[in-house]
Amino acid sequence: MRRYPAAFLLLLATISAVSALRADDWKSLQEDEIHDPDNPALEVMQNPAAALSVLAPDTAGNKVDWSAALHEGQIAPRSGLKNDELPEILELDIVMKNTLSAPFVTFQHRSHTEWMACENCHEELFVSTTDANPISMQAILNGQYCGVCHGAVSFPLTECDRCHNVRPDYQRVAPSGAKQSDDP
Amino acid sequence: MSRNPRLRIVATLMLLAIPAAIAWSEYADVVMNTRAEAEGVAPVIFPHWFHRIRFQCSVCHVELGFKMQVGSNGFDMDQISDGEFCGACHNGEIAWTVENCDLCHSGKLGLETGIEGSHKTGGPGIY
């Protein structure tokens, strides 16, 4: 490092800048550009970082792996206001093969029923008959089908291989660095 | 770019830092301003992240009847005070009451009704 002191200092400065920005994954309410920073109520409201930085990490969306947070007992969201019965979990994977050159899609009912009731999706968003829904990425990107939630609340549409996760030879697509997630 | 490998590493690290520096509001925050500002109050910011820690999706989107389309619910403060929509919890029993106007009506003036997501996702995860 003696031969390149400037480069070494620059490297240190960059690393510290990057780590400072990583801590910036969640903007404070005062700085998020949608809350009015002059609103005195912001002082008593929880900032995203306070709640989300302690949950299972992810790389996209809220930067939280919500399914892992649920499975690891970090959160225990109530399933109802009137009666708090446990949700009805459905163990049924649907493999969608009409995906052109992309890997097949495995839709897991399990990870979705951990958060939602059947009526959330059926029969308004999806007909309960295999291959009866004309799903396309175009429609999804326009906020239909999976796009009602994915890209708005649940993990965003940039995470292709979380859904397109099975090759035609039925080998699971290896997660490319990022953790494979069941987050609906 | 320089042939010096150390400088290349430094330059690469600096380039990597750029996307992280772009600011976004929290993913899935909902802005409600269909009638708020027209009626003299600030737009509402609804934080999905805060609520999904405490409730499953189906509580609001089935039991309380919130349609999963921003701007399509069309409820007003009278309905909330009567215990519908947000008022099912924000009644002083499950959560704080509707008298705390500023806690919900906390948005900047001029915001459009919508959800913070889509092209504002912060980009792909780290691959």
Image: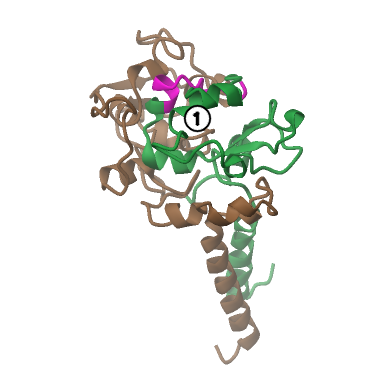
Chain colours: A brown, B green
Residue A139 sits in which quadrant?
Answer: top right
Q: Is residue A28 above or below residue A97?
A: below
Quadrant where the C terminus of chain A lies? top left
Residue A104 can be seen, yes or no: no
Whether residue B64 appears in magenta in the rendering, the answer is yes
Relative horizontal placement of residue B78, taking residue A79 as reference (left or right): right
Given residues B108 and A65, the one toward you in this image is B108
Q: Is residue A35 above or below residue A91?
A: below
Whether residue B70 appears in magenta in the rendering, the answer is yes
Query: What segment carries the magenta color?
Result: B60-71
Percent across and percent down for residue A121 are: 41, 17
Relative horizontal placement of residue A79, taking residue A133 as reference (left or right): left
Q: Residue sitting at 50 percent across and 52 percent down?
A: A46
Given residues A127 and B71, the one toward you in this image is B71
Residue A171 can be seen, yes or no: yes
Which residue position is annotated with label 1? B86
Q: Dominant secondary structure of the magenta stretch? A: loop
Percent across and percent down for residue A62 are: 49, 46
